[in-house]
Amino acid sequence: MPTFEQLRREVWETNLGIFRAGLVTMHAGNASGIDRKRGLVIIKPSGMDYDKLRPADMVVVDLEGRKLKGKWKPSVDLPHHLYLYQHRAEIGGVIHTHSNYATAFALLGRSIPVYLTAIADEFGAEVPCAPYVDNIGDHIGETILQHMGKAPAILLAQHGVFTWGATPRAALKSAVMLEDIAKTSFLALLVGAPKPLPPEEVQKWYNRYHSTYGQEKKS
Amino acid sequence: MPTFEQLRREVWETNLGIFRAGLVTMHAGNASGIDRKRGLVIIKPSGMDYDKLRPADMVVVDLEGRKLKGKWKPSVDLPHHLYLYQHRAEIGGVIHTHSNYATAFALLGRSIPVYLTAIADEFGAEVPCAPYVDNIGDHIGETILQHMGKAPAILLAQHGVFTWGATPRAALKSAVMLEDIAKTSFLALLVGAPKPLPPEEVQKWYNRYHSTYGQEKKS
Amino acid sequence: MPTFEQLRREVWETNLGIFRAGLVTMHAGNASGIDRKRGLVIIKPSGMDYDKLRPADMVVVDLEGRKLKGKWKPSVDLPHHLYLYQHRAEIGGVIHTHSNYATAFALLGRSIPVYLTAIADEFGAEVPCAPYVDNIGDHIGETILQHMGKAPAILLAQHGVFTWGATPRAALKSAVMLEDIAKTSFLALLVGAPKPLPPEEVQKWYNRYHSTYGQEKKS
Amino acid sequence: MPTFEQLRREVWETNLGIFRAGLVTMHAGNASGIDRKRGLVIIKPSGMDYDKLRPADMVVVDLEGRKLKGKWKPSVDLPHHLYLYQHRAEIGGVIHTHSNYATAFALLGRSIPVYLTAIADEFGAEVPCAPYVDNIGDHIGETILQHMGKAPAILLAQHGVFTWGATPRAALKSAVMLEDIAKTSFLALLVGAPKPLPPEEVQKWYNRYHSTYGQEKKS
């Protein structure tokens, strides 16, 4: 289990990661991580330049969102992160972006079927698109919970993307891979009619990827 | 209020910002800022490489465009910047680009409706497209004034984009976010028929963003 | 003939090359090289960040895939690389990616005809698309062998891309050029009906490129 | 007039410029410059990595293509560069690329009309597309001469792009701007029917740009 400093650094690196991967522009988007033992959530501060952030700029709150540490205000999307942490004990990191190709699917209210072996590998199922929801109270968190499937990612209609994972880093991988497969899928839709892989084929890829892929600790 | 050196540096950083964000190529585009107390406008010099610009290369003029400082000629688009500063006291920074996706909408004479929560957040209303106008006298400035709405951005048909804000940095945010939402909107139009958010939903996002977002000083 | 250190470095550089060229994201994709005299294959480790890889992180196996050197597990795609090395003596380097435009063709099960002189130069023939195949045993290797043509590249339906060459570096060139010509071809298909070059014209470009192009050692 | 060292450096920088602007991949493309007083042409060597090139790697030939200086073989496209220098005394720099959006127009055999004020500014007229031509002898040079118009750029069907200017740097500007306006024009064609500017409007932009734009020496 990471120390507080290690987790804060990982949350900071994950925020840099979504910026460097081109998933966010200016101040949009945010990444967080949870330390369940210590009961604290670490998240990007609101409206600050990614490339000037330092680990110490991350904001530390408790699971009800009360600020414990940090001189900045947390991301306005903090309530949605907290809602996911409160309702899914297996989630250790959450990311929100408006990455372009994934959000183009979201704008049309379309899920992304398992068109590609890479989607089977990473997500194991379609990435669903939840219906439009406003930003009042826990509406976003509730909608995500209600519509999430097997994949550690969801689209919110006319809005954007949430991804998650056991760690902030795992959530980053989902966010990057989601935009990548959204782009390829989107391109194919422009000139033809791609077909999803049959479920038994999806399973083969998912199983291989989640049993033999990576080094000792998957990340 | 920034000192002269601080504002000049901010104008220089904003010009670098539109270049680094890929909104401009070669020498196209320009950013400026105004110091209303001292009565001077600072703008990019004409036709010079962005990546070689230094703060001291910025050109300083008065509100009628007479050069006060700097060895270079100012951007040929200076008159349009001045026109906006003269007619809108709340504007502190102006940017002009031909960023690709926004300009694709402009080439078709199409406004960008509030398809996305990010458009509601940042712009609070559609980004209008003004009709084609030539470059004689104050035609561009007049057209912008006539067609601007709530959003701090406008498209000019068959031409490009102007954005503005309380500071050069705020105008940069508008310019970057405009291209980002133009891209996602454009992609969605290629495979479906996106629908704008209802006005009351737009308001919810705009209100949250403009009341609780960011740190003490919004930028 | 390169020394072991030189080849390992070339394999490492080739892995960096597919990452820097934007052909892969996160941990997807992999490149390898073979030293036939010493009977060893060098390949990227599984699931590790490209930008943190060092030459010593490459994994060394024999032609049956038994690990000879390196502390990491090899790429899960190692069997497909080995199959190509075992069955094609002229192949010295192999690359696998899911690069977006080429994979969009693959998702639709479409080959890329010789639309462009650059395709004639580099590939000399269409880049075929093999039918979908699962990841069991040697299915991928067998399918590639069965469907490969003159071009040192193939698409696998609903999956991605394999390229190869006399060296890892030559395979890199194929991988980069494939994505480049896939993008241009794809764009043209969106607004019109591009036509392949006639075979005799293809031959003229291929012959020039493969006789007079480059310095003494083509790479 | 630049010294030999200055021109060689400018040719080198121009080659780096097309690479950094993303107009070329791997070894494709090339830029050259001419020193008419000394009777020599400086061009990129064939098939070498852009990011490893040094000024001294540029190849120096006379106007008939005989090598005067440099250890490398010149670009295989040297004859087309020479043909342009021989037949157009005002040309001081030439660039060849396969930049994606411009080449997508070329693949379809379509010229790029003056859709945008930026096209009027930079090119003053449509960018024509010459019919397909093979690579034998002076076929490419002859075709360019026959089909070139007012714009310092031309498309070659199913092949790519040539641009030129008074200096290598001016040719670079044409090459970068061409890809930029090709992209915007291409995008607009995907969702609508853009219309060219009327000739009298084109003239207004071209005149302003070529009289008042830039610093003392336009580049």
Image (spheres, coloured by chain):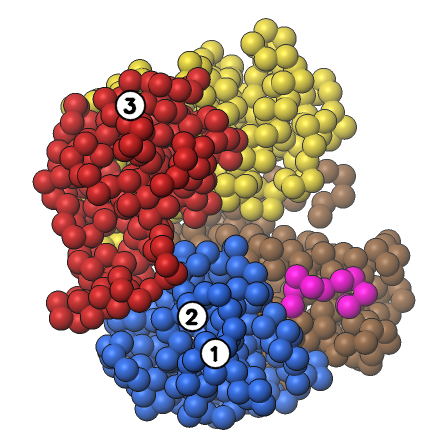
Chain colours: A yellow, B brown, C red, D blue
Mark 1 residue element: strand
Q: Residue at 26% across / 62% down in the picture?
A: C210
For disc 1, the chain is D
Between B67 and C194, the one nearer to me in the picture: C194
Mark 2 residue element: loop
Near mark 1 (Cα within 10 A), the count class, few <14, some 14-19 or many ≥20, is many
What range is drawn magenta here? B49-58
Q: Residue at 42% across / 92% down in the picture?
A: D87
Q: Quadrant of the N terminus of chain C?
A: top left
Question: Is label 3 on the same chain as label 1?
Answer: no
Q: Position of residue A71 (x, y in %)?
A: 76, 28
Residue D157 occupies quadrant = bottom left
Numbered label attached to residue D61 = 1
Say which residue label 3 marks. Answer: C62
Query: What whole-number distance in Å separates the C-alpha atoms at marks 3 and 1?
Result: 49 Å
Mark sitting earlier along the chain (2/1): 1
Examine the rendered structure and indicate whether residue D214 appears above or below residue A118. below
Marks 2 and 1 close (CB-CB < 8 Å): yes
Q: Position of residue B14 (x, y in %)?
A: 69, 58
Kind of residue at disc 3: Asp
Question: Is label 2 on the same chain as label 3?
Answer: no
Residue C103 among magenta residues: no
Say which residue label 2 marks. Answer: D74
Kind of residue at disc 2: Pro
Mark 3 residue element: strand
Any part of residue B22 in sight: yes
Kind of residue at disc 1: Val
Residue B52 among magenta residues: yes
Query: What whole-number distance in Å separates the C-alpha atoms at marks 2 and 3?
Result: 41 Å
Near mark 3 (Cα within 10 A), the count class, few <14, some 14-19 or many ≥20, is some
Q: Position of residue C208 (x, y in %)?
A: 26, 68
